[in-house]
Amino acid sequence: MHYGEDDCPVSVAYDFPNDDELHFGIEMLDFFKAKVINEGLGWESPREPYEVTAWISAETGDGKLILSYMEGEPYFFTIGKSEVLKSLEMGIGTMACGEKAVVYVNSQYLTQSPLIPVIEGLEEVHFEVQLVHFIQGNRLFKEGKI
């Protein structure tokens, strides 16, 4: 059953061109590319203003390690506060809890952040991320006002 066919429950205007081709224009507005290593649990993903805890390491496209939060304490940040690169934030925003993935970011989408303050000279960065935990952040609740 399709829109415009006789058995479609949605009525169509008499002059609707149901035999014409439909063309879509697609424009990529933002970028990230991820490769899932291990699937996560559940369906929910973090979004603004979620607080995220994750193991994160980063290496250049040629394999040089430039960042590692894989031992000791995992990295903690809040989505939407520019505490990590925007493209990395977008990649993590598609992950489920426990998921491990690689997010590939080229120089066009590298943005400065406290996680990687110096981006000059970097052509591509591969982030390995394991999403440990996330919760919806609420400043008023934390401050005891609610």
Image (cartoon, rainbow, N blue to C red):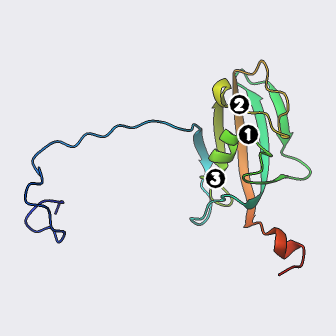
Given residues 14 and 41, the one toward you in this image is: 14
Seen in the image, is 8 located left or right of residue 83?
left
Q: Earlier in the sequence, mark 3 or mark 1?
A: 1
Mark 2, residue position = 110
- Position of 136 relative to 18 (above/below): below
Which quarter of the figure has residue 105?
top right
Q: Earlier in the sequence, mark 1 or mark 2?
A: 1
Residue in view at x 75 percent, y 62 percent? 133
Assess disc 2: are there few (<14), some (14-19) or many (≥20) residues with their C-alpha within 10 Å of its C-alpha.
Answer: many
- Residue extending furthest bottom? 146
Assign the N terminus to one quadrant of the image: bottom left
Which quarter of the figure has residue 76?
bottom right
Q: Amino acid at mark 1?
A: Leu
Mark 1, residue position = 85
- Percent of width and height locating residue 95: 62, 54
State the mark number for residue 93. Answer: 3
Given residues 46 and 113, the one toward you in this image is: 113
Which quarter of the figure has residue 34?
top right
Q: Amino acid at mark 3?
A: Gly
